Structure formats: C-alpha cells, structure tokens
C-alpha cells in the first residue's frame, strides 16, 4: 500500500496582503498536503483575527506594536503563540517544525526574513522580489550554500522557470519578461504630473497590493523583475528582454538558440504560480485557473517605451552598476511610491527621485548584509530629505 505523504508545514509572511490571502486559498485547496504553521502581518488586526480563527496557526507575528498588543489580548486564552517584531519572524521561520516559507511581505521589510529562511535551510517561496533586488548575489549564494532553491512566486519568473524546462541552459538565447504596461502605457494623452493615486491604483489586468500596483504603473516593477530574473536564473541583463503585453495572458517566455520561443500562458491569477511553487516540481489538477483560448481575442507585444517610462531604464542601469546600486534604487523607489500614495510627491517625480538618489550614491561592490542594511537606510533618509526639499 502507498504510504500517505506527511503534510508540509507552511509559514506565510504577509498573510494579510494580496499574495498572502491568495496563498491561504491555495493551502485551503490542498489541506491533505499542507498545514498552516505560522502567519505574519503588520497592522491588519481584523483580517489577522479572522485568519487565526479560520486557519488555526501555531505561531503568529505582528510587526506593529499596537496591533500585536490588541491581538495578544484577544487570544490570551488560546493555544496560538502571538509575538512581536522582526526578530520573532526570524525565529518563527527557523523553527524545526517549518518546511516552507512564503515570503509575501511588501518592500525592504522582507529582506531579513528571506535571509533567515534560507539560513535555517528552509524552502523559500519568494514573492518579495525586493529581497533579490537589494541583495541578489548574497541571497543566491546563500541558497546554493544551503542547497536550497529559491522558488519564484512572481508570475513572470514562475513562467520562465516552466519555460526553461524545454531546453538546456546553454541553449537559451534570451528570457522575455512580459509586462501589462499598467494603466497608462497605451494612453497617449496622459499628463504624468497630474496622475492621481486612484488612477495609478486602477490596474487593467491584475488585482494587487498598493505598492506593486504603483510600481506597475511606472514600469519600475518590471525593472525590479529584471533584476530578480538576473539573480534567479543567472542570466546577464543583456539577455533579458522586456515586452509589453497588455492582455497579461503570456506570463513570460524563453527564446532558445534555434529560434523557438516557449511561452507560459494562463489566466492572470496568482494562485497558479503560488500552487506551482508550493507543489514544485509536481503539477496537480485544480478547477480554478483555466484559460478559455477562444475568448482571447488577440495577443499583442510591443517594445517598451523607455522615454515615457524612464524608471525601467534606471533598473537596467542599476543592475549594470552592480554592488549596492540596486539596493539604492529599491530604497529610493520605496520612499517615492509611499510619498506618492500619501500625496507628497507627484507621479512623474518617482523616477526622477530614484535617478537623483542613485546618482549621489558611491557604489560599493561585493557588499555584505550589513552594507546592504546601511545603504538601504542611507538611501531612504536621502530620499525623505529630498522630497521635503523639492515638495510635490
Ligand atoms: N500582489 C501580487 O499579485 C504580486 C505579484 C507578484 C509579486 N508580488 C510581490 O509580493 C509582495 C507582496 O505584495 P502584495 O501585493 O501582496 O502586497 P500587500 O497586499 O500590500 O501586502 C503586504 C503584506 O506585507 C505586510 N507588511 C506591510 N508592511 C510590513 C512591514 N513593515 N513589516 C512586515 N510586514 C509588512 C502587510 O501587513 P498588513 O496588511 O497587516 O499591514 C501585508 O500582509 C511584494 O514584494 C510584491 O512585489 C505581488
């Protein structure tokens, strides 16, 4: 008789976010394969309260003190352990009970949890692309040292991982990352200095968190994904092309040396890449993600407009500079996006600010983790000061 497989215990960091919620839905579809061991969130008290009741994790960490105190009070008589702060996230992911960590924290706050996960020798399913942008070389070296693969959750990288199964690495000509283009790509008349927060948050094809939605509108998200792809697949930036594909049906492609292009297509739904990462290398049937090709009227591909979207070019530039440059780009962008969302910076100034901060930075090659942390802090402080000086 076939022995039933032991359930894998999963931690979801950022479980209250868009990816975190999708991840919980996927785990719910595979209750026979996974249990939710731990969750983390920042400030969403109501949703975390619901998730604790619904998914019964053993360990929960909050990174905002007020939310932590309220939840601790609420669950004081219950079995769940509720803790506060980044040190406890690091502790939770390192516990021997944990098999897989899905890092779906947004922004640079995801960096140390990614390191802690790999350091503890756990499988890292990575949505937090900012970790790889900030410290790609360090993280990929650590994964190799620990004999662990970083499993991409980003749909483009999941697509590339699947397309790479069609040939050998030495046969790859280029990776082709597709981008929806966001809400403004096809709009010829739009005045970037007048774009409002609600316009920028109206993504045409994907429903996502606020930061990544703004990053998609500036195309900086695609630039961050370029850096992510470089480190995940060890491919130089010259061999990574970006194509605007407004329908978001082809999630990315690999071109081989004989001219064949292999594409991965599906509905734009993050549950599929999450499932692929969680079950990798297995494919398991589901009923949630089927694409009806007869309803896809056209698939179009356009070259990116670097003049209209200068942030994308900056990402290629930062990757070429190497060392601490991508970390600076990421930090400046994070502050710029936050300021745009808080109506302290206009949309057109996001790439401008990133360029200014990047150009005032003296790049350090081969940084260690402490260098990365201090450069991240420096770039954020500089960005905040610059925004105060220049205003909206
Ligand atoms: N959304 C997508 O479809 C998508 C696709 C590909 C990749 N990604 C990547 O996945 C990551 C998450 O994106 P998202 O769209 O899910 O973001 P989101 O909806 O904004 O969720 C972010 C999560 O991170 C938590 N968080 C916020 N600030 C934190 C901090 N300082 N420390 C610890 N946790 C913090 C939030 O907690 P609270 O809600 O409690 O504040 C929430 O659980 C990003 O790196 C993004 O680029 C997202």
Image (tube, rainbow, N blue to C red):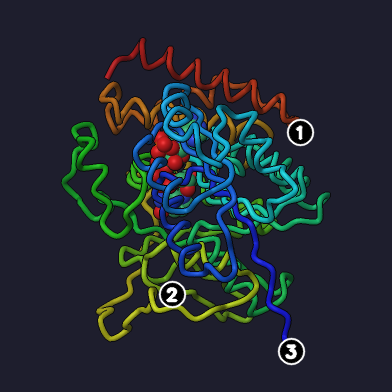
Residue 201 at least partly seen: yes
- Cα separation, mark 2 vs mark 1, equals 37 Å
Q: Closer to the camera, 340 or 113? A: 113
Question: Where does the C terminus fall, quadrant-wise?
Answer: top left
Q: Residue at x 56, y 42 (%)?
A: 79
Question: Where does the N terminus fall, quadrant-wise?
Answer: bottom right
Q: Earlier in the sequence, mark 3 or mark 2?
A: 3
Q: Is disc 3 in contact with disc 2, using a CB cutoff of under 8 Å?
A: no
The label number, if any, that marks residue 166 in the structure image: none
Residue 172, placed above or below residue 127: below
Residue at the limit of the structure toward the bottom, as seen here: 1
Residue 80, placed above or below residue 153: above
Q: List the residue tagged with mark 3.
A: 1
Q: List the residue tagged with mark 1.
A: 366
Q: Residue at x 70, y 39 (%)?
A: 116
Mark 1 lies within 8 Å of ligand 1 (Cβ measured): no
Is 114 left or right of 386, judged from the image as shown? right
Say which element carries label 1: loop
Q: Closer to the camera, 194 or 294? A: 294
Q: List the residue tagged with mark 2.
A: 265
Q: Residues within 10 Å of mark 2 (few under 14, many from 20)?
A: some
In the rendering, at what x and y percent does residue 190 appear?
18, 43
Say which element carries label 3: loop
Q: Residue at x 41, y 15 (%)?
A: 386
Quadrant of res 32 = bottom right
Say which element carries label 2: strand
Ligand 1's quadrant is: top left
Q: Is disc 3 in contact with disc 1, using a CB cutoff of under 8 Å?
A: no
Q: Residues within 10 Å of mark 1 (few under 14, many from 20)?
A: some
Q: Residue at x 62, y 51 (%)?
A: 101
- Cα separation, mark 3 vs mark 1, equals 53 Å
Is 50 left or right of 159, judged from the image as shown? left
């Amino acid at each position: 008789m076939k022995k039933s497989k032991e359930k894998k215990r999963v931690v979801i960091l950022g479980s209250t976010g868009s990816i975190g919620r999708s991840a919980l839905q996927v785990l719910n579809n595979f209750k026979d394969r996974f249990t939710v061991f731990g969750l983390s969130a920042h400030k969403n008290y109501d949703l975390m309260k619901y998730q604790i009741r619904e998914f019964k994790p053993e360990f929960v960490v909050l990174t905002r003190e007020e939310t932590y105190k309220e939840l601790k009070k609420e669950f004081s008589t219950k079995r769940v352990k509720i803790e506060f702060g980044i040190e406890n996230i690091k502790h939770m992911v390192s516990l021997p009970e944990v098999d897989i960590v899905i890092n779906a924290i947004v922004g640079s706050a995801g960096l140390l949890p990614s390191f802690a996960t790999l350091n503890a020798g756990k499988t890292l399913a990575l949505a937090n692309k900012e970790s790889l942008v900030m410290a790609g070389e360090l993280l990929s070296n650590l994964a190799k040292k620990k004999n662990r693969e970083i499993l991409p959750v980003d749909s483009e990288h999941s697509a590339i991982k699947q397309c790479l199964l069609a040939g050998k690495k030495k046969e790859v000509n280029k990776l082709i990352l597709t981008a929806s283009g966001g809400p403004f790509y096809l709009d010829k008349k739009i005045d970037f200095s007048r774009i409002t927060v609600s316009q920028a948050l109206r993504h045409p094809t994907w429903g996502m968190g606020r930061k990544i939605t703004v990053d998609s509108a500036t195309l900086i998200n695609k630039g961050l994904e370029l850096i992510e792809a470089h480190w995940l697949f060890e491919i130089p930036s010259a061999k990574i092309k970006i194509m605007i594909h407004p329908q978001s049906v082809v999630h990315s492609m690999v071109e081989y040396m004989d001219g064949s292009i292999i594409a991965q297509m599906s509905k734009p739904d993050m549950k599929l890449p999450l499932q692929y990462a969680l079950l990798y290398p297995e494919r398991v049937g589901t009923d949630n993600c089927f694409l009806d090709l007869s309803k896809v009227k056209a698939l179009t591909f356009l070259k990116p407009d670097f003049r209209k979207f200068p942030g994308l070019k900056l990402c290629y530039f930062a990757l070429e500079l190497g060392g601490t440059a991508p970390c600076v780009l990421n930090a400046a962008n994070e502050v710029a996006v936050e300021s745009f969302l808080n109506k302290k910076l206009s949309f057109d100034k996001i790439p401008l600010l990133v360029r200014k901060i990047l150009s005032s930075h003296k790049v350090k090659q081969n940084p260690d983790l402490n260098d990365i942390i201090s450069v991240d802090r420096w770039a954020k402080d500089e960005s905040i000061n610059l925004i105060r000086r220049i205003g909206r």
